[in-house]
Image (spheres, helix red, strand yellow):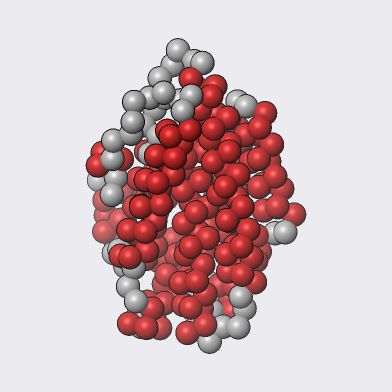
Amino acid sequence: MTSSSFALPALDLSHISYIASIQEHIDRVIDDLLASFPHVEELSADERRGIIARYTAVLEGNFIYWMTGAYLSVRSEEARSIILDNLREEVRDCHPGMLRKFAMAAHAVPQDTDALAVYRSLSNVRLFIGRLSPVPIVVTMAFFEGFIQRFMAYLADLAQRQGSAEQEYTDVHGVCDVAHTKELFRALEAEMALADDSAKPVENVFEGVDLLQTLIQDIIGKPDSSSVLAADKN
């Protein structure tokens, strides 16, 4: 499901129904994504390793960058405060290190092929974040926090089947991202209130959600990294 298949109500940002419509769409996207994933018990050890490794290759070095982009883009003090709290937790508790430890215990440290498999879709997300468009970025991060929270049980199952007993990363994010998602929707309300007062129209609010869907599908799937390299040479 992409933004082109979903019609928002008339753009009256003063109504809470607009935020609710965005949240409902995001919930459906997450439902559809999770339903499309292969059953863990049907995956080989190499396929399980690949999913964990590609997820790590994406999140370990990029999530704080994405959230920093959200912080730089927003204009309201409420949104800045919410996003800064999120960033502070990421850095204070060393979430990238927590993820690296999780991947190591599952024998799934990312390799060059894992990074290449997500290269193009990850680059598209980075470029999107770099435009610093406040409302679309906050929608994107709210979607991703909501996805991560619900993805943790699947990720933990993958690791356990790889012989890992290291569950700190999945345990922490299965809980904290519930609050993070809720807070980001509060930040979205604050930013949309400012957008309502602006003469500049709000961009496609689901652009980043669509890009992240593609990236998540690359994490779960098995794209041919050689084709990525060939395409980038053209």
Front residue of 25/206: it is: 25
Residue lying farthest to the bottom in this orientation: 163
Quadrant of the image for the C terminus?
A: top left
Q: Position of residue 81 (x, y in %)?
A: 69, 36
Identity of the residue drawn at 40% across and 66% down: 113
Depicted 42 relative to depicted 36: above or below: below
Residue at (51% x, 38% y) in the render: 138
For this orientation, the residue located farthest to the right is 92
The answer to whether residue 172 is visible is yes
Q: Please indicate whether residue 20 sits to the left or right of residue 85 in the image.
A: left
Tell which of 188 and 117 is nearer to you: 188
Percent position of residue 193, x then y: 53, 24
Residue 217 in percent (x, y) is at 34, 59
Task: Pinpoint residue 190: horizontal percent, then vertical percent.
Answer: 58, 30
- Quarter of the image for residue 167 reads bottom right
Mark yes or no: residue 233 visible. Answer: no
Q: Quadrant of residue 175?
A: bottom right
- In the picture shown, does residue 195 fall above or below 207? above
Residue occupying the point 44% across, 40% down: 20
Residue at screen point 34% across, 76% down: 39
Label tally:
0
Q: Residue furthest top?
A: 199
